[in-house]
Amino acid sequence: MESQTHYLNNDEELRVEVKLGTVVTATLVDGAAEIFGAELPKKTPTTLPGGKHAIFSWRGATIEIAGETEMTYTANASAPMTAYLNVDGVLQRRREAARAAGTPGPRVALVGPTDVGKSSVAKILCNYAQARWTPTFSDLDLGQGGITCPATIGAVPIDRPIDACEGLPLEMPLVYFHGDVSPGNNPTLYKALDRMGEMLRARDETNAAAAASGVVVNTMGWIDKAGYGLLLHALEALAIDVVLVVDHEKLHAELSRDLRGKKIKVWKLQKSGGVVERTPEFRRRSRDARVREYFYGPLGDLSPHSQTLEFGKVSIFKIGAGPSAPRSALPIGQESSADPLRVSTVAPSMSLLNAVLGVSHGKTQAELLSSNVAGFIFVTDVDVANGRFTYLTPCPGELPSRNLIAGTLKWIETR
């Protein structure tokens, strides 16, 4: 494999852009360096999958990159990284005070528009904290799929460094399936997902260590009009007490105004110079890559199991009646009859082909809105004539539930 050696000075960052669907390796030859706050092991290759990565060194390092990259360059990142380290110091002191007092630790939300590096800062704060604590990472960005598949929100405890290739530890994830990558297509359902906040509060009441460790939340990038309203709702639902606004003066001013009088700190953070704007095509390909990774693993080395099941042995539901027409399109005085939280059955049809379905923990139709999901299946074939369908699942055996949830999330598998 092609190999390049890069030398980092103090406070410099090596930015590595890897083509989606490929991997390179990074080896720390000398010095000390970290990737999103997680220390690189010396003389041990670390796999970097497709995407953008930043390897930072406080005191200098020699890094060897093996494999073909789209772009690799170094830059000074002293200002943003020092700011992130200072934030971590404040959060660490608040965790210590919370542990001593037996109260919940800091609940931090990264907010801002798309493509300012919110999820990267969240990873850095989680990796810095996990050396002494077990913070909970929560992702509210439906389009990103930061924990499992896209079209979900979720939370997961971070008890070890976040691996650059394998991502978040997923032994105990709490995941809710919205079904759509855009909250704007059913904002009422997005609000209903605040039951995750109730689950986190219930956990804190029985787990003092988890409570003191706090929560780090990555929010979506829709911050205008209705999106801003959803953001305020999320901050309240998750009991956020520290808001970090990344690279957006207007949003900082709005939140400072609207949260005045509440016990919430609103701080500004600058974005890293390595953050670049992603095209709609890149976002779509990234979502597809996340779905593929769920079933085949980050390196494509897992073998999902294909099974065929009769439609009569499962129940497939959808939530909501789809986006309703705007009031301006309705007759004067008439309201839309669409119920965004209506749970209805889905009849077997070819429309289920290539659908990603959530396997709900809800035992009844009434419990679907309040239940998280056990995982996902991918429908590869639909045989309407014989009343059966074929699907992929990450592990063998029967499905943990017969209640499945369909949304608009689909994936076209390519080899």
Image: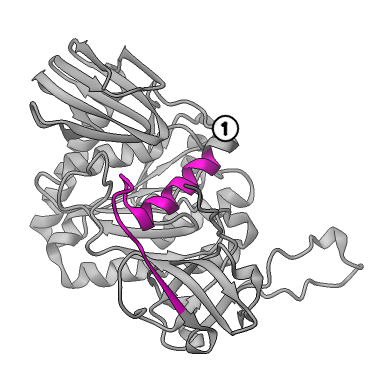
Q: Which residue is mark 1?
A: 279
Q: Which residues are magenta?
A: 283-308
Q: Position of residue 366 (x, y in %)?
A: 50, 86
Number of dots carrying numbers: 1
Task: Look at the image and tell me whether residue 278 can be seen.
Answer: yes
What kind of element bears circle 1?
Answer: loop
Compared with residue 398, is residue 180 higher up or lower down, i.e. above or below? above
Is residue 306 shown in magenta? yes
Q: Amino acid at mark 1?
A: Thr
Name the side, left or right, on which 139 lies relative to 281: left
Which of 327 and 236 lies nearest the eye of the viewer? Answer: 327
Within 10 angstroms of label 1, few (less than 14), some, or many (20 or more) residues?
few
Task: For the N terminus, give its image quadrant.
Answer: top left
Q: Position of residue 4 (x, y in %)?
A: 25, 14
Residue at the spot x=14%, y=43% of the render?
93
Q: Quadrant of residue 74?
A: top left
Display coloring: one colour
Name the side, left or right, on which 244 lies relative to 27: right
Q: Position of residue 57 (x, y in %)?
A: 18, 20
Which of 373 and 216 lies nearest the eye of the viewer? Answer: 373
Compared with residue 406, is residue 251 higher up or lower down, i.e. above or below? above
Name the side, left or right, on which 413 lies relative to 6: right
Is residue 9 shown in magenta? no
Residue at the spot x=25%, y=51% of the render?
106
Residue at the spot x=40%, y=27% of the render?
271
Task: Look at the image and tell me whether residue 33 can be seen.
Answer: no
Which of 97 and 10 lies nearest the eye of the viewer? Answer: 10
Compared with residue 173, is residue 44 higher up or lower down, i.e. above or below? above
Q: Quadrant of residue 230?
A: bottom right
Residue at the spot x=36%, y=22% of the render?
69
Q: Position of residue 213 (x, y in %)?
A: 18, 54
